Amino acid sequence: MSLSILAPARPALGRQRLVAALGLAILALAAAALAGRQGRLGVLFLVGGGIGIALYHAAFGFTAAYRHAIVRREVTGVLAQIAMIALAMLAFAPVLAAGRIFGHGVVGAVAPVGVSVVVGSFLFGLGMQLGGGCGSGTLYTVGGGSARMLVTLVAFSAGTFSGSLDLGFWLALPRLPAISLAAALGWGPALALQGAVLAALWLALRRWGRGAPQRPLWPGLPGLRTLLTGPWPVLFTAALLALLNWVTLVVAGHPWSITWGFTLWGAEAARLAGWDPASSAFWTGGFPARALARGALADVTSVMNLGIVAGAFAAAGLAGRFAPRFRIAPRALLAAVIGGLLMGYGARLAFGCNIGAFFSGVASTSLHGWVWIVFALLGTWVGVRLRPAFGMAN
């Protein structure tokens, strides 16, 4: 996804300064209010804000990166993802190996592997090409002023809530338990194995992209003005996102995730519309029931998601590109709805999206993360070929 999708031109400077100031004020005031309720929530809201700024200023997303690699053999975005995962993996290792930091426990993003993951990740890969963004891409483009992506977000939340209602059926199908390569092999062998796979993927992608125009992966460190207004170098952003995921692990006790927040938003909206949580096995016990009882503003993932939107809003103002457009072509609107529903339903079945399942999962040495990306890429391949039917260019 490029910044040109968010806004074709720079609107009046005065209005952009107002947007930037408002966005930064929201980050500060909301963080202070959340910290008053629980200290770590304020910190994590600011971490989300930093993520939103980084995503916006680099136009860093998974959806366009995969599509460009398939269609144009432009692999810079995917190479940056590999570097990001490798850095996070190395940073996670000592924390997860210890199991505790600063007096509290930490756990990795490790999930079961089964039919639900295969089906869910395929649906997610298909849906993100129609919806126009993955979980993180949806959030930062909404913050940047995209009305179409707001439709995707609403459909995403509906889809993942629907997936939660059906999850019992999918989990009853054949599956393996959650497998951590570090727990099975030891941290040293697990890191070596995953490092070798990532290195092989890096080399294969460089070969695939040979002869095709490529964006520079590392044009150098950005100066102060570029840090404020963008655009940011993609590898610099990848390293920053790895760092912020590590901060999330340390503060929250688990890595960065996104789609659980959407599930909770969908459940809260359904309850307002008259749905009874007691009618669903998923929502009547354990963590989901406690999260719903506490509300979205007490949930780590939900708070970080809101921080991403606020951060991207501030970044759009700083870049002078906040210009929301509300006219959406009918076919594009239909694609946003279908894509959002598929992503949401798929993410719930597959225990996450590109962030929670792939990025955080592989960084945690979860076998589930590797299975997720294989079938998400298959779904992406199908989605790329369906985009022209909805009037969307590749």
Image (cartoon, rainbow, N blue to C red):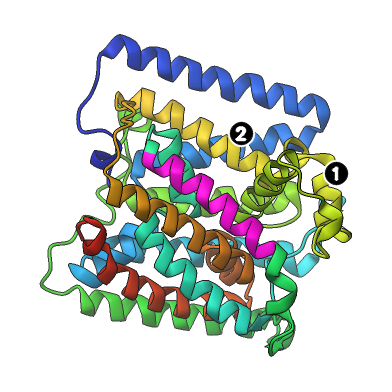
Q: Is residue 1 visible?
A: no
15 in relation to 89, above or below: above
- Tell me the number on the disc at residue 293: 1
Give the x, y percent position of residue 15: 34, 12
13 in relation to 334, above or below: above
Give the x, y percent position of residue 12: 25, 14
The residue lying at 60 percent from left, 69 percent from top is 361
C-alpha separation, residue under disc 2 versus residue under disc 1:
24 Å
Residue 160 among magenta residues = yes
Q: Residues within 10 Å of mark 1 (few under 14, many from 20)?
A: few
The residue lying at 51 percent from left, 36 percent from top is 309
Give the x, y percent position of residue 162: 64, 60
Q: Which residue is mark 2?
A: 46
Kind of residue sitting beneath label 2: Leu
Is 298 on the left or on the right of 123, as rendered? Answer: right
Residue 338 among magenta residues = no
Disc 2 vs disc 1: which is toward the camera?
A: 1
Give the x, y percent position of residue 346: 55, 67
Kind of residue sitting beneath label 1: Ala
359 in relation to 206, above or below: above
Q: Residues within 10 Å of mark 2 (few under 14, many from 20)?
A: many
Element type at mark 2:
helix
In the image shown, does 275 or 113 lie closer to the viewer?
Answer: 275
Residues shaded magenta = 148-164
**Callout 2 touching callout 1 (CB < 8 Å):** no
Main secondary structure of the magenta stretch: helix
